[in-house]
Amino acid sequence: MGRMPKSARFIAAVIVVALTAMVLVGLQLGCGSTSEATSVGGPTGSPVTTAGNGSSKGKLYVAVTGTADLQAGSGDMGMAIIDLATKQVEMVNIPEAKAPHGIIFPTDTKTAPNTRGRVALEQPSSIYLGNAQDGSVLVVDLSTNKVTKSIMPPPDAKLAICAMQVGPDGRIYLASMADGKVYPFQNDTIMSPGIGGAGATTSICGIAWSADGQFVYLSNMFNPQDPNECGYIAKLNWPSGTPVNKIQNVTNSSPSGGYMAREIEVTPDGKYMYLADGADSSLVKIDMATETVIKRIPIGGEPHSIVFSSDGRTAYISVSHQPVEDGSSIFVYDVAKDQVIDRIPGIPAPLVGGLVLQESAS
Ligand SMILES: [Cu+2]
């Protein structure tokens, strides 16, 4: 038995495929429509004083992956809890963590409408943390910051958790980077089979639904079968999973090649979908009515996830930085201006994943 558990080897294989894809793509730039590129974002790294926009109180809970064995997709750590009023970052080291990427409030938490369960209006008693390495979900008690339960995926699920979102039926869904499927999660059980895959999606980072709940959008991080294919967003009928179409050319290549379509999030008014383009250090704004890219906003770093405040005016974006020593940050984003207006630095970890917002001031 090698030192690396089977699940870690699986993710390692996934990552190797991703890296191979990046090498193969090499210098084939221009897959994304650079002619559409706009540069409206403020200069990266120049903090601007946040105006009182009503969203500067509360807490962010951020899934954080540590330094150990990062290339294999594993690593310890847990989550960061950030007080928005003071910008204090509290690191919560969770021994059971296996590369956390996803985070979501339990469904009995009071949450704001149209936020897919990601904006709490009260202090939750616990939180779910989703692991990329072994596909397990941890229940973390927020009064002790200890794990009270570890929930393993069913044996037939190839689950490497990225996004965790509440679907139109009120259940939590888990996006898998390993097999391109979405798995329902209910009563502390991960259910199989998943929805998606079968050519429509190969490695999902983000999940979003249309306002009427008839369609699901899945951001495909990369396509191991066709490394020349840019990151795209697949649209499927919900909940049947029948493919409808793909929004193509959503992501741009990194300067060294390779695509990284991270998580997607729809604004609370349902008008726009934003995608975190990890390879291009930008946000991509998509008009939901036409399903086309209308703006690219360079923000710097490697954005992973986005959460909108319940009023839709402010977004918080988890951003990983390279090299590792720089740590990671949360960017505060003015949605109307499409501009980064502040940064909360000081997350001492190379990779930040999903994040959720608690708007109450307590
Ligand atoms: Cu992820």
Image: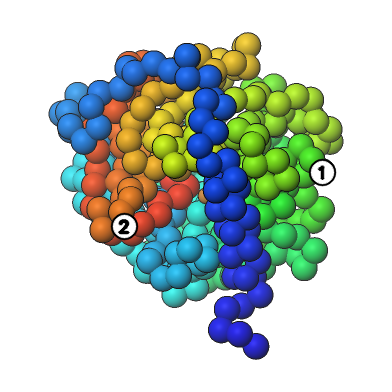
For badge 1, the amino acid type reads: Ala
Give the SS element for disc 2.
helix
Q: Is residue 282 visible?
A: yes
Q: Position of residue 71 (x, y in %)?
A: 48, 63
Q: Position of residue 82 (x, y in %)?
A: 30, 50
Question: Which circle marks residue 324 in the picture?
Answer: 2
Q: Quadrant of the N terminus?
A: bottom right
* Foreground pick, 16 / 336: 16
In the image, is 291 to the left or to the right of 122?
right
| Circle 1 residue | 198
* Foreground pick, 198 / 60: 198
36 above or below 77?
above
Q: Position of residue 215 (x, y in %)?
A: 73, 27
In the image, is 50 to the left or to the right of 206?
left
Q: How is the image coloured?
A: rainbow
170 above or below 35?
below
- Residue sticking out furthest to the front: 27
- Residue sticking out furthest to the top: 290
Give the SS element for disc 1.
loop
For badge 2, the amino acid type reads: Val
Q: Residue at x 32, y 35 (%)?
A: 300
Q: For marks 2 and 1, give the CA distance.
A: 35 Å
